[in-house]
Structures are given as C-alpha cells and as structure tokens.
Image: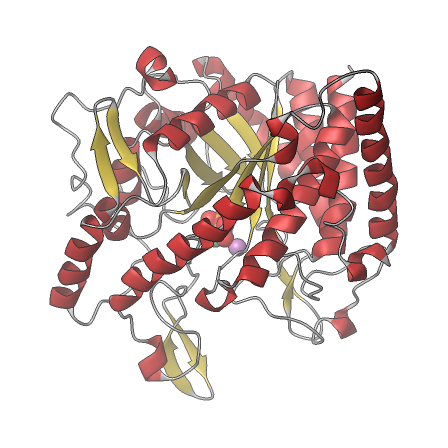
Amino acid sequence: MRLKETGPTPHHAPGDWSPDSWRGLPIAQQPTWPDPARLDEVLDELALLPPLVLPGEVDELGASLAEVAAGRAFLLQAGDCAERFSSCTEDGVRSKLRVILQLAILLTYGSGLPVVKVGRIAGQFGKPRSSPVEVVDGVELPVFRGDIVNDPEPTPQARTADASRLLSAYHHASATLNVLRALTKEGFADLGQVHAWNQEFVRRSPAGQHYETAARDITWALRFMSACGADVEGLSTLRQTQLYTSHEALLPGFEQALTRHRPNGWYGTSAHMLWIGDRTRSLDGAHVEFLSGLSNPLGVKLGPTTTPGELVDLCERLDPGHVPGRLVLISRMGADRVTELLPPLVRAVEFTGRRVVWACDPMHGNTFKSASGYKTRSLVDITREISGFFAVHRAEGTVPGGVHLELTGDDVTECLGGADEVLDGHLCRRYETACDPRLNATQSIELAFRVAELLREHHSR
Ligand code: PEP
Ligand code: CO
C-alpha cells in the first residue's frame, strides 16, 4: 500500500528494465556451472515454486525502514556469515532466533526505540570470495562459494558447482522460514519469555547476568502496566514479533527465478531484503542492474574503496524515486578508518536529499589472521567501529540507523575478546563457521548493551 503512494520508481523508462536485463552485463563472483542445461532446468523449476516471502510483507519492511531512516526506529540485521544447510534444524533456527530476540529487546529497552529485526537467515547461502581457487595439500581447488553452489569439503568433486543446490537452497530456506514463522507467532517470542531466552551457558557469564537484570526490569515494567489496568495480556505486539529475512543477492539467476510481478512492481520473493556486496556493487554490473528493478528494500555494502561520486551514482541507479528507507547503506570501513572514510559518503548522500538508512557492519573491515592462524575479529575493534559510526552521525547531524552483525546463538570461539575472554589459544575449541568468524551469544549480548548505550546517548541529545 505504501509503495503505491511513494514509489518505487525504477530508474528505467517503462519497459526498459526486465527481470533478465542483467544478462549479458559484466558479472562478478559467479561459479562456473559445469552443466548449463541442468542450470536452466533448475531455474525453470524454481520459477514455478511459490514465493518464500510475500510482497505485502516486503512493503511492510519498507515502511518500517522509512521509520528507521527518520530516526524513529533502529535496524538490527544479524545472523550467519554463511548459513549451512545442515544448520536448518528446529534447534538451529531456535538458537539463532533466540539471540536476535535477546539483542532486540536489549536495544529496545536501552534506547526506547522500536527495533526492526532482519535476519541474515533463510537464504544466506551464497558467498563472494577473494579468490576463485585455493590450494589445499598441494591441490588447486575451486573455493567454497556457499552451500547454494558447492560443498566445503576439499575435494574436486565436492567443490564442483552443482545447480541442484539452488533447489536445495530454496527448500532449506522454506523450511527455515516455516520454523521462524511458527516461533515468532507463538509463545517463544512472548515478552513474558524474556528470561527463557537466556540459555544456561549465557546465564553463567557476566553478559548473561547483566541480561537477567534487564529481563527482571522488563518483567516488572509489564507487571506495573498490568497493575495500572493496561491489558498487557491482550496486547498481541507483546506476544508475537516479526523477523524479516535477508541475504546477499549473489546469484541473479536464482533471484530472477523467484521474482514475481504484482500490480505495483516486481518483487524479489527469496527474502524481504536483498543486499549487494562490496565486491559486486559495480555500477555497470549485472547485480546493480538486476536489483535496481525490484521493489524490495536494498542493502549496499560500502567498503573503504567507495568514493562519494560512485555512491551518489549508485543511489541514483537504485533509488531514483528517493523513497525513504529503500536503501540501507551498510558501511564496513574498519575501526581505524570509519571516522575518516564515512563522513564524505554521508555528506554526499545527504546532499542528494535522500532519506536512507545508514547501518554499520563492524565485522568485515576488522578481520585478520590470528597468530595461531585463524581468521578472526576482536570484540574491541567491533565495538570501536560502531562507536566511530555513531560519532560520525553525531557530527554530521544524521541518523545512525542500524547495525549489521555476523553472530550465532551458540557458544562458539571464533571472535576474540568479551568479558568471558576468548583468547587466541581458545579459537581452536569451537571454530565452526563456514566462512567469516561470528560473535558468540555472550559476546553479542555484551555488544548489544554497548549499542543500546550509544543509541540512548544519541537520542537524548
Ligand atoms: C558478508 O556480508 O558476508 C560479506 C561478504 O560482506 P562484504 O560484501 O561487505 O564483504
Ligand atoms: Co561475512
């Protein structure tokens, strides 16, 4: 409904954009499919399957992101770096949802703002890589590009791209969404369950104890409202929640097969929000062309090489109609450079008059190899980049709209630091990620307290 009033306005003249207008354009980060006929067969099959998300839900997210862009809500986008088919179990989904709900409630409670929850979930199966090949035990192999393409096992057969995996990705996303929809609409997401979200291993940690105190305050606040006569039990917004889904739209063929037309435009129906990675945001490339025609809210990752001119051109291509909240600009500059690199970008976009969502990805600019050889990130750097991001928006008078995190609800040891300190020597204990290192549940909660503090400071000015 909202889109009828405000857009979207594709940049193309009517009839110019079509779901396959990206074909033939330069395209980065694609696997070599050994059997193109099988690929076409799979894409035809996908095109006949039902949408994973509904256009109406996509529009609702668009409306919520317009609130974020205006500073009246905050975006929490979080989940796996590379989701695995094997983590698509009831417990796996429950554990991810649990930590996202915990973070969202801490952010809401700490800042007094509604939190728009978007998971890197139910489809985050494709990964851009820094090199197309790697050498394992003297053998050169194609890299792992995510479960939607190949398998991480280091054998030539496992690493060969397999188009049947596109269908598997659809079905795993569908099963994940099914559990998510059930859990967010029944007792699990009830605010009365705020204590139950704290798992035993989290409760024992300093962050978990701090969380318990906040949860106790929230329970008391609900009792107080109830005692004053408010119908707390009857409020469905306290018993249910909405978690939107998102992933990097790395494979336009897959996304095109799930694109559906509605009277007010074309919708990508593989997820509510799709984003363009830092490696695929080339202006004349296939990814920008494809996403420019969709009505979905679009994320764009902005790394240190982004120039203000390039960014303005990207905004023009992707949001010619200046639709508030259509673009989520996700900067990932690194803790040391964010205060230098972000301000010129913010100013350039401000100058165009757009209301975008500025989000901070404090993960991808802070990755390094530890002395013991693990790809890792430290909670100190992650926190520092977010603080820098808030400082920039304070100085520019703009809205720090959200954070974009790679995390898990499990007790993994992939990122360094935290009050239950993960040291380099601990990384080998539970290093389970298929791609980038994720915050574990206690590190995530610790970070949420800090972000809530920054938000409260920002909005009390
Ligand atoms: C990611 O989000 O996992 C990713 C690859 O990010 P970026 O495009 O910012 O490098
Ligand atoms: Co990542």
> For this view, does 331 lie left or right of residue 410?
left
The one nearer the camera, 8 or 364, is: 8
- Which quarter of the rendered picture does the C terminus lie within? top right
The one nearer the camera, 449 or 90, is: 90
> For this view, does 31 lie left or right of residue 104?
left
Q: Where is residue 454 in the image (x, y as percent from the top left)?
A: 76, 30
- When the figure is inspected, residue 442 is found, relative to residue 346, above or below; the finding is below
Q: Position of residue 102 (x, y in %)?
A: 70, 44
- At x 23%, y 45%, the residue is 256
Q: In which quarter of the image is residue 25?
A: top left
- Which quarter of the rendered picture does the N terminus lie within? top left
Q: Where is residue 210 in the image (x, y as percent from the top left)?
A: 87, 45
- When the figure is inspected, residue 387 is found, relative to residue 187, above or below; the finding is above
Q: Position of residue 197 (x, y in %)?
A: 72, 49
Q: Quadrant of residue 67?
A: top right
The one nearer the camera, 291 or 272, is: 272
- At x 52%, y 67%, the residue is 434
The one nearer the camera, 184 or 304, is: 184
Q: Is residue 248 visible?
A: yes
Q: Quadrant of residue 292?
A: top left
- At x 61%, y 23%, the residue is 73
Visual colour scheme: secondary structure
- When the figure is inspected, residue 208 is found, relative to residue 346, above or below; the finding is below
Q: Can residue 356 be seen in this view?
A: no
